Amino acid sequence: MRKKMVAGNWKMYGNLLENKQLLAALVAELNGVREDVIVVCVPYVYLPSTQNELQNTTIAWGAQNVSQYEKGAYTGEISASMLSDFQCKYVIVGHSERRMLFGEDNDVVAEKYVAAQRAGITPILCVGETLEQREAKITEQVIEQQLMSVINVAGIESLSKAVIAYEPVWAIGTGKTASPEQAQEVHAFIRAGVAKQNLGVANQLIILYGGSVKANNAPQLFAMPDIDGGLIGGASLIASEFITICRASR
Ligand code: PEP
């Protein structure tokens, strides 16, 4: 049976004091009592303090982005090995905000995915369609292209060391959630596509849903057979919401 996973994406929110309070609440309620994987993906500068708060707990931490380059004259960039220095286990790659606001295309996302895995970090690869693409009925083509650009570079087996997050762009931060059935349909499409190439990898692949997941809709989403948990933005900043979502994951 696949593990369930809930990952928080703090985006560019928080400060030292608020983070300390949030993490203390998560540790108090979730440490050691959940079998599923629980992760918080924090802004780079808060990795050391997050590591400090979470080390020796069962809650993992990660980053929200990584450079595709190993090292060099890339002012302002952070490499995967730097993330490893702070024991990041996960890194989000290809989040729609990075794709849309910072011009990251499928090729760059694939390079970031490879860079993360080279450093032993599990990439959480985000895929998803815009509203226009859904209305044009090209959701499956868009997602296939996003996945294939990674598989072509890294190979299908690389997915055994990755997590996929299906995040319809129209549902991120908008309060509009895909219905459990809509999300399940895409998750099943992703798993079936991987299964055509490698059944074992497909069966083990964790596919998260992301897009306005809240405490009140998580149970229905997480009950679907191919939804293995969630990537949570806004609600991951509110301790009680995130804790309830984590509890809904099984
Ligand atoms: C996200 O940032 O990945 C996300 C899903 O955000 P939200 O939950 O706020 O829609």
Image (cartoon, helix red, strand yellow):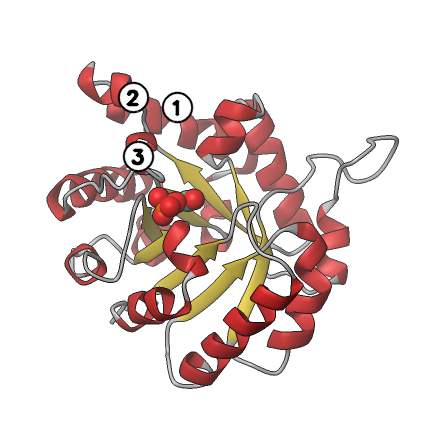
Whole-percent x, y for residue 89 in the image: 59, 61
State the residue position of label 2. Answer: 141
Q: Residue furthest front?
A: 17
Which SS class for mark 2?
Answer: helix
Q: Is residue 99 visible?
A: yes
Is 162 placed left or right of 73 in the picture?
left
Q: Nearer the viewer, mark 1 or mark 3?
A: 3
State the residue position of label 3. Answer: 168
Tell which of 8 and 71 is nearer to you: 8
Above or below, 43 against 69 in this view is below
In 3D space, how far apart are the residues under numbered discs 3 and 2 (Cα atoms)? 13 Å
Q: Residue placed at 88% from the left, 30% from the top?
A: 73
Q: Residue furthest top?
A: 136
Whole-percent x, y for residue 8 in the image: 45, 57
Circle 1 packing at 10 Å, graded few (<14), some (14-19), many (20+), is few
Q: Are marks 1 and 3 in contact (CB under 8 Å)?
A: no
In primary-sequence order, the first of circles 3 and 2 is 2
Tell which of 198 and 58 is nearer to you: 58
In primary-sequence order, the first of circles 1 and 3 is 1
State the residue position of label 1. Answer: 145
Circle 3 packing at 10 Å, graded few (<14), some (14-19), many (20+), is many
Q: Is residue 232 visible?
A: no
In 3D space, how far apart are the residues under numbered discs 1 and 3 (Cα atoms)? 15 Å
Image mark for residue 50: none
Question: Which quadrant would the C terminus be assigned to in this image?
Answer: bottom left
In 3D space, how far apart are the residues under numbered discs 2 and 1 (Cα atoms)? 6 Å
Which SS class for mark 1?
Answer: helix
Q: Is mark 3 within 8 Å of ligand 1?
A: no
Query: How many numbered circles does the render carry?
Result: 3
Q: Quadrant of ligand 1?
A: top left
Which SS class for mark 3?
Answer: loop
